[in-house]
Image: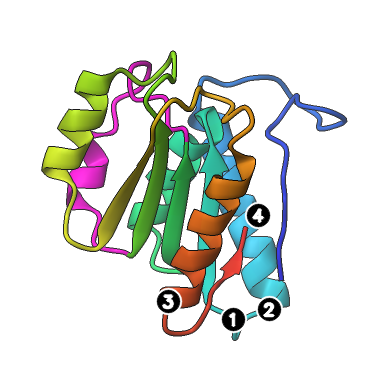
Amino acid sequence: AALRINFRGVGRSTGSFDQGLGEKDDVDGAICWITGRYPDLPLALMGYSFGAWVALQVGYSDPRVAAMVGIAPPLDLYAMDFLNQNHKPSLFIVGTQDEFCSRESIRQLQLHLPAASSLQILEGADHFFSEQTDPVMRLISGFFQKLPAGPSAL
């Protein structure tokens, strides 16, 4: 099962941008909905850019979340030190040409990640992984295939 959400104020969603605070409530609401509908399935959170920052904050501390994927987390824009305490299986995908993720930020993340986390660096990839979506999809598929129960994605 998969559920894709827009944060408040995006697309036809109601509300307005809330600097990540209300957006965490959006993620929690989505978790409540999907776990209510599929209570026996393990749950994984996946987010891109700002969505990665928000989803990862919620996911690492929520016991309902079994695994996480962060695609192009904007390491230069938002503090992600909380990931140092994350012990859930997690995959982080960054590009060496990401304008919101400097090589130094990538190095710092790499130095402090716990053993359950994996950092994949795509050489030459920008923030949008232009012309590199296939490698990103392969990395994500491989990550989920290696998990014991194959969690659903949110």
The label shown at residue 38 is 2
Classed neighbour count for the residue bearing mark 2: other residues with Cα under 10 Å, few (<14), some (14–19), many (≥20): few
Q: Which residue is mark 1?
A: 41
**Residue 87, how many percent across, how many down?**
24, 62
Q: Residue at x 52, y 28 (%)?
A: 50
Q: Amino acid at mark 1?
A: Leu
Q: Amino acid at mark 3?
A: Leu
Q: What are the residue bounds of the magenta stretch?
A: 72-88
Q: Amino acid at mark 2?
A: Tyr
Q: Amino acid at mark 4?
A: Ala
Left or right: 17 in relation to 136: right
Q: Is residue 92 above or below residue 48?
A: below
For the N terminus, which image quadrant? Answer: bottom right
Q: Which residue is mark 4?
A: 30
Q: For residue 75, what is the image quadrant? A: top left
Classed neighbour count for the residue bearing mark 4: other residues with Cα under 10 Å, few (<14), some (14–19), many (≥20): some
| Secondary structure of residue under mark 3 | loop
Q: Residue at x 51, y 20 (%)?
A: 19
Q: Nearer the viewer, mark 4 or mark 1?
A: 1
Q: Earlier in the sequence, mark 2 or mark 3?
A: 2
The reply to whether discs 1 and 2 touch (Cβ–Cβ < 8 Å) is yes
Dominant secondary-structure state across the stretch colored magenta: loop
| Secondary structure of residue under mark 4 | helix
Q: Nearer the viewer, mark 3 or mark 1?
A: 3
Q: Is residue 33 above or below residue 112?
A: below
Q: Is residue 27 above or below residue 11?
A: below
Calculate the distance from the C-alpha at mark 2 to the C-alpha at mark 3: 18 Å
**Residue 145, how many percent across, how many down?**
50, 75
Q: Which residue is mark 3?
A: 147
Classed neighbour count for the residue bearing mark 1: other residues with Cα under 10 Å, few (<14), some (14–19), many (≥20): some
